[in-house]
């Protein structure tokens, strides 16, 4: 029997559903991971002219409980899965019960086949749900039955497809989108062997990661209780979002909130994210900026959180310094030499000394070299070369100290 959704079809369509097939597919993948799935399969077949008649997304999650249908499919803009995963690189939001309607971006009909375990009897049950594009405010659960054996999970199949071909789901653009959307999540769960597969081929994400480091930080609170934080630093090989964040995850690996890191205003290619997982965030209110009166809730003013933030900012500072000292500085000098920015010097030792100063200056303050056109670059490096050739290295140090504060270590680098 058809059931009514708590909003009209027009209301659903105007609620901000994905307008792109890639974002729509991502919604269903996140739904699978929300349901505790570890493997998501995207399957389809094409004919000789690349036509695709249907596409299926299958997960090995817990399935959709029939007794909770009114709280899931029937209650729009308010989902039972309020603690859904947040996404780092896109604007997709799957926590409002809208995700199930996303198929309308590329399909006229969606059919869910789901198997779940009854929480009371422990028995497996299966049934199907149908929603069509032209009447999204009605869903049709049917064919409910008990199974003697099997496993839980859900397969949603999309038919009456439009504006997509087989190439749409095989293209590098589609795969890159999924890599950027889910790469961080697959990486955090690599020990659990989480996968997304497209017609059996595992979606790669490792090429997005330039370096990664995982550590554990133990901290004691004022009462002497220990709190442990698993910290995963990632430097991406390319930009995967507009900003760089600390992501705070609870013990269920659900993102509770995120904060900008201190290194968002740079153009040196230091693309990074930091993920902090801890049971500590199971009872945390990031919106409360005061000392909460709730004994069971922590805030940003909690001593442990303040200590944690100091550690995180120092971690990113050291990581950026190591990146600039190595890869970024070498890249800058290479580009300067290729583009003729470095003046021609007959004396090899003088050229070596100039390159060293340029690299060290870049390591101390990368912004000194940003936003300059080629002529400005030539002038700056040329003046440095003249000062060094005149034996005025100390004057260079003093000049730089008037522009940026220098530590004793910085001064040693420039001498």
Image (spheres, rainbow, N blue to C red):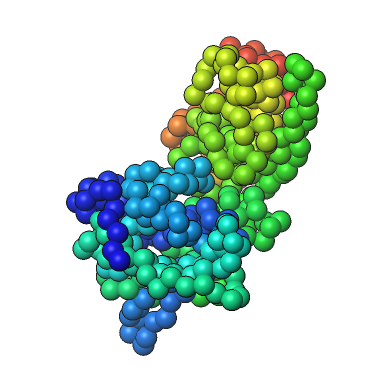
Q: Is residue 239 visible?
A: no
User: What residue is rendered at 35% in x and 48% in y?
Assistant: 75
Pick whichever, 28 or 180, lies toward us: 28
Pick whichever, 293 or 344, lies toward us: 293
Image quadrant holding the C terminus, namely top right
Q: 302 left or right of 61?
A: right
Q: Is residue 97 above or below residue 58?
A: above
> Residue 211 at what x, y percent from top left?
67, 48
Pick whichever, 380 or 54, lies toward us: 54
> Residue 6 at what x, y percent from top left?
28, 48
User: What residue is rendered at 68% in x and 17% in y?
Assistant: 303
User: What residue is rendered at 28% in x and 63% in y?
Assistant: 2
> Residue 374 at what x, y percent from top left?
45, 37
> Residue 235 at what x, y percent from top left?
62, 44
Outermost residue on the bottom side: it is: 48
- How many badges with numbers are in the image? 0
Q: Is residue 249 visible?
A: yes
Q: Is residue 289 above or below residue 12?
A: above
Q: 43 left or right of 317?
A: left
Outermost residue on the front side: it is: 121
Q: Say which quarter of the image contains residue 345.
A: top right
User: What residue is rendered at 45% in x and 60% in y?
Assistant: 66
Q: 226 left or right of 268?
A: right
Image quadrant holding the N terminus, namely bottom left
Q: Is residue 361 above or below residue 111?
A: above
């Amino acid at each position: 029997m058809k059931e009514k959704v708590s909003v009209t079809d027009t209301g659903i369509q105007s609620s901000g559903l994905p307008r792109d097939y890639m974002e729509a597919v991502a919604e269903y993948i996140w739904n699978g991971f929300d349901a505790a799935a570890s493997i998501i399969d995207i399957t389809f077949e094409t004919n000789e002219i690349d036509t695709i008649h249907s596409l299926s997304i299958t997960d090995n999650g817990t399935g959709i409980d029939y007794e909770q249908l009114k709280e899931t499919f029937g209650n729009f803009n308010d989902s039972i899965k309020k603690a859904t995963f947040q996404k780092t690189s896109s604007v997709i939001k799957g926590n409002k019960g809208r995700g199930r309607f996303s198929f309308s971006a590329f399909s006229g009909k969606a059919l869910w086949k789901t198997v779940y375990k009854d929480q009371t009897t422990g028995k497996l049950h299966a049934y199907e749900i149908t929603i069509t594009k032209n009447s999204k405010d009605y869903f049709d659960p049917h064919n409910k039955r008990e199974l003697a054996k099997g496993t839980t999970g859900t397969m949603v199949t999309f038919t009456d497809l439009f504006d997509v071909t087989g190439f749409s789901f095989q293209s590098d653009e589609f795969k890159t989108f999924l890599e950027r959307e889910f790469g961080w999540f697959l990486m955090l769960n690599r020990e659990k062997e989480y996968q997304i597969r497209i017609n059996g081929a595992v979606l790669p994400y490792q090429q997005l990661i330039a370096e990664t480091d995982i550590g554990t930080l133990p901290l004691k609170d004022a009462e002497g209780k220990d709190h442990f934080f698993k910290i995963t630093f990632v430097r991406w090989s390319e930009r995967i979002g507009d900003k760089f964040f600390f992501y705070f995850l609870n013990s269920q690996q659900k993102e509770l909130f995120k904060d900008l890191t201190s290194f968002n205003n740079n153009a040196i290619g230091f693309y990074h994210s930091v993920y902090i997982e801890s049971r500590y965030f199971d009872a945390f209110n990031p919106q409360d900026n005061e000392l909460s009166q709730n004994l069971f809730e922590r805030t940003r003013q909690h001593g442990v959180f303040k200590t944690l933030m100091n550690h995180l900012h120092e971690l990113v500072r050291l990581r950026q310094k190591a990146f600039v000292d190595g890869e970024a500085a070498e890249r800058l000098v290479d580009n300067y030499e290729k583009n003729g920015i470095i003046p021609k010097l007959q004396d090899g030792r003088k050229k070596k000394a100039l390159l060293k100063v340029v690299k060290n200056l870049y390591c101390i303050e990368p912004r000194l070299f940003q936003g300059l056109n080629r002529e400005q670059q030539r002038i700056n490096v040329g003046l440095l070369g003249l000062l060094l050739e005149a034996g005025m290295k100390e004057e260079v140090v003093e000049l730089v100290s008037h522009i940026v504060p220098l530590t004793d270590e910085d001064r040693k680098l420039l001498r």
